[in-house]
Image (cartoon, rainbow, N blue to C red):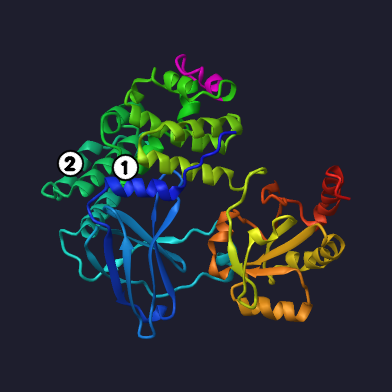
Amino acid sequence: MVKIFRVTVFALLVLSSVRVNGNEATVFGNAPDYKGNELIFYTYTDYITNTENEVGRCTVDKDGNFKATLKILETSYVFSHLGIYKIYFFAEPDRNYELVLPAKEEKTEVQRLNPFFRETDLQVGIKNITHSDINFLINAFDVRFNEHFDQIVQSAFKGEKENVDSLINHIEEKFTDCNNPYFKAYREYRYGLLRQITLLKKSASISNELFLNKPILYNNPSYMELFNLVYDKYFLFFSRTSEGNRIFEDISKRKSLTLLEQTLSTDQVLSNDTLKEMVILKSLYDEFFSDNFSRSALLTILDSLYRTTKIPEHILIAENIRNRITKLLPGFVPTPFTLEDINGKKISLDQFEGKYVYLNFCTTTSYTCLQEFSLLEKLYNKYKKHLEIVTISADKEKADLKSFLKNTGYDWTFLYYGNKPGVIKDFDVRAYPTYFLIGPDRKLIMSPAPSPKEGFELRFFNLLRSKGEI
């Protein structure tokens, strides 16, 4: 299989060369509730995979003061995870924002360990805001828009007619003098979303009007939300037409980007090559999580697009898609990590190269984890010549793990997730315990792997025997 060989850093450098509006904004404020806490600010590198990219961080001092510089290239949706909240605001280069953080409310232990817990979106307050600021404008618009949105959508589902265009004109009366291009586009695609959801206009009509010969607004969440809705599962939808029924052969049998593009070109809504490429990227990502197409074929098409595209944003999106869909597939190298043990020593996965690694995610408060630790100990003592066991603890405090190990005496590798909490997301951990088997070449063999109770030892023994290692 063809490998993507350029790195995301390269794509980001290319992007920075074509965006020259500026590259910094500053956030500051006073939040005594958060003293001693680290604030990390992110943007999405793309709105197809929603890959998070850190743009700045700072620590709140003992007096509650904080200040951070944000590396941004254009008007950007910036967010931070604060307990039960996901705070957000829109940052423009060369601007200073005095943030008013919400009262601190930590996640409960149940919420913290629940991978499906959704933080509450909260547009953060800004003290030094003006009426021309993008945050003031978007907030004023959203309040006005949302007043009627739910009612109109419910009426549409009931078959009742609402005068959507009249409502849009009513909302627009307040903003006709606002010339900020980002805000203008934000409103335009919100109206498009309303028309799409209420079926006032069909997807083809929305595509022709708002996407076909318009610039792609990669960094505008309103644009991208409508884009993701209009072109949702596009491959499957178009394959049902007489012109598009060759899609399955183009992808799964021929594995040809060229043939796929030729087939899609028969759909007039994709007569723009840049838009067509963007739709292909989204559709490849959508279909990888279905059973409609061969995954290896989808990866081949993705790699072909990556090598041939001339659009920097599409290079970055292709990399994000590939990283997202392959990181936990058997035969691929998982996301690397470096974590600390209970003594603060940094340990990386690469240090175990040459041995099999039975990687597991646990907490010392999980009854199932506690039951399986005794089985892990037996496995470790029996197979330590071939197998390294690495347990990543998701306990709230490192002290809890340290106390547990002191009392139990377990001596395989225990690491604490605290200095890189993203490792939980990188391995898509949805329950504790979760297991993986990684080979001596650092590639995943079993993903996920069975637990000790589920017969891991027999499968591992058979693996070693099949390779002549025992």
Nearer to us of marks 1 and 2 is 1
In the image, is 266 to the left or to the right of 136? right
Q: Residue flagged by tag 2: what amino acid is it? A: Asn
- Element class at badge 2: helix
For residue 92, which quarter of the picture?
bottom left
Residue 337 percent coordinates (x, y): 58, 60
Q: Residue flagged by tag 1: what amino acid is it? A: Tyr
Which of pointers 1 and 2 lies earlier in the amino acid sequence?
2
Over which residues does the magenta segment extend?
Answer: 240-251
* Towards the viewer: 99 or 339: 339
Label 1 packing within 10 angstroms: few (<14), some (14-19), many (20+): many
- What numbered label is drawn on residue 223? 1
- Element class at badge 1: helix
User: For the point 51% across and 23% down, which residue is it?
Assistant: 256
Q: Residue furthest right?
A: 470
* Towards the viewer: 170 or 64: 64
Is 290 part of what is drawn in magenta?
Answer: no
User: For the point 72% across and 78% down, which residue is it?
Assistant: 404
Q: Is residue 258 above or below residue 333?
A: above
- In the picture, the quarter occupied by the N terminus is top right
Q: Residue furthest bottom?
A: 63
Whether residue 130 appears in this view of the structure is: yes
Residue 390 percent coordinates (x, y): 71, 63
User: For the point 46% across and 69% down, which residue is it?
Assistant: 83
Which residue matches tag 2?
Answer: 169
Residue 280 percent coordinates (x, y): 44, 31
Residue 307 percent coordinates (x, y): 45, 33
